[in-house]
């Protein structure tokens, strides 16, 4: 009976691979023929599935940073510009306050949320990058289809009445393994779809260049006393280390000179 079980597993694997071979070949042929399809620049022609990430740096006065960060956070959490979720937020105060905010939002709300953060001319830097997930999505879809087919075939074989207990256990282990792999593939597909259907924005709020320079000067003045104290402390420690060495070295030099002079006197007397 074990050879029947092995045969069933082999048939399930071969059946899935043989059914996907024409699909893979057709996909490869489509990719090879794509450059001759007219050279269009539309997304449909390129066959891309893009996951966008934006990075926006906003410079404004230090007292405005906390309020502006909260305004953007509230607009996202409240769905003011569409479905949006806050992924993380960091804020620091002091002489050089700053904040960062990361959100994921639907495409139609991206520009309006960025406009709220920058309010016109306060956007110092902005960048955008996109990752093409078309190949990853295609591979994951094919993987799910293969696993589902193999799972169905094994379930059909498991219904046989003439299976031995060892064969049933082997089938059960393999079915559980396939179900685990299928669940992981489905979770990956959901993550891919989320990245494609929404866009990631990372906001960085910082003070203006003039305020940042003045803060650096003020910080340097504050650190002046500490630096002087640290240098003086270093010199005191160095003196404490070198003093006994100098005393010992001076004594040894005095002994050597004394012996040398005594030897010269003996030579002169002889």
Image (cartoon, grey):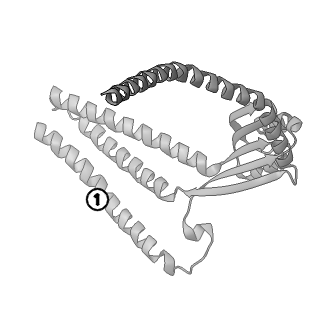
Nearest to the observer: residue 97 or residue 152: 97
Residue 130 in sight from this viewpoint? yes
Rendered location of residue 34, percent (x, y): 49, 75
Rendered location of residue 140, percent (x, y): 44, 50
Nearest to the observer: residue 200 or residue 146: 200
- Compared across the picture, whether 30 is left or right of 83 comes to left
Residue at position x 75%, y 48% from top? Answer: 57
- Compared across the picture, whether 236 is left or right of 208 comes to left
Rendered location of residue 232, percent (x, y): 68, 26
| Badge 1: residue crowd in 10 Å (few <14, some 14–19, many ≥20) | few
Residue at position x 73%, y 42% from top? Answer: 83
Rendered location of residue 156, percent (x, y): 28, 40
Nearest to the observer: residue 230 or residue 217: 230
- Residue identified by numbered label 1: 18
Q: Is residue 206 above or below residue 171?
A: below
Nearest to the observer: residue 153 or residue 103: 103
Image quarter in which the N terminus is found: top left
Q: Is residue 100 above or below residue 139?
A: above
Label 1 sits on a secondary structure element that is helix
Residue 93 in sight from this viewpoint? no
Number of dots carrying numbers: 1
- Compared across the picture, whether 14 is left or right of 91 comes to left
Residue at position x 37%, y 45% from top? Answer: 148
Residue at position x 81%, y 34% from top? Answer: 221
Residue 267, quarter of picture: top left
Image quarter in which the C terminus is found: top left
- Compared across the picture, whether 13 is left or right of 4 comes to right
């Amino acid at each position: 009976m074990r050879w029947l079980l092995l045969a069933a597993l082999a048939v399930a694997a071969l059946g899935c691979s043989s059914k996907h071979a024409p699909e893979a070949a057709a996909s490869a042929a489509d990719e090879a023929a794509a450059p001759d399809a007219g050279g269009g620049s539309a997304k449909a022609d390129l066959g891309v599935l893009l996951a966008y990430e934006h990075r926006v740096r906003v410079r404004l006065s230090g007292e405005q940073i906390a309020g502006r960060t909260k305004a953007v956070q509230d607009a996202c959490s409240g769905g003011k510009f569409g479905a949006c979720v806050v992924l993380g937020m960091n804020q620091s105060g002091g002489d050089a306050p700053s904040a960062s905010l990361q959100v994921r939002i639907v495409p139609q709300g991206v520009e309006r949320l960025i406009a709220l953060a920058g309010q016109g001319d306060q956007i110092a830097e902005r960048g955008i990058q996109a990752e093409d997930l078309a190949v990853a999505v295609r591979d994951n879809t094919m993987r799910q289809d293969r696993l589902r087919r193999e799972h169905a075939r094994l379930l059909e074989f498991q219904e046989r009445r003439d299976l031995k207990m060892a064969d049933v256990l082997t089938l059960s282990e393999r079915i559980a393994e396939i179900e685990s792999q299928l669940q992981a593939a489905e979770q990956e597909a959901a993550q891919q779809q989320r990245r494609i259907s929404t866009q990631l924005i990372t906001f960085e709020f910082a003070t203006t260049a003039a305020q940042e320079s003045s803060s650096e000067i003020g910080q340097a003045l504050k650190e002046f006393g500490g630096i002087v104290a640290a240098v003086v402390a270093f010199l005191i420690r160095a003196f404490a280390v070198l003093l006994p060495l100098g005393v010992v070295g001076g004594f040894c030099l005095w002994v050597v000179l004394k012996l040398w002079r005594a030897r010269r006197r003996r030579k002169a007397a002889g």
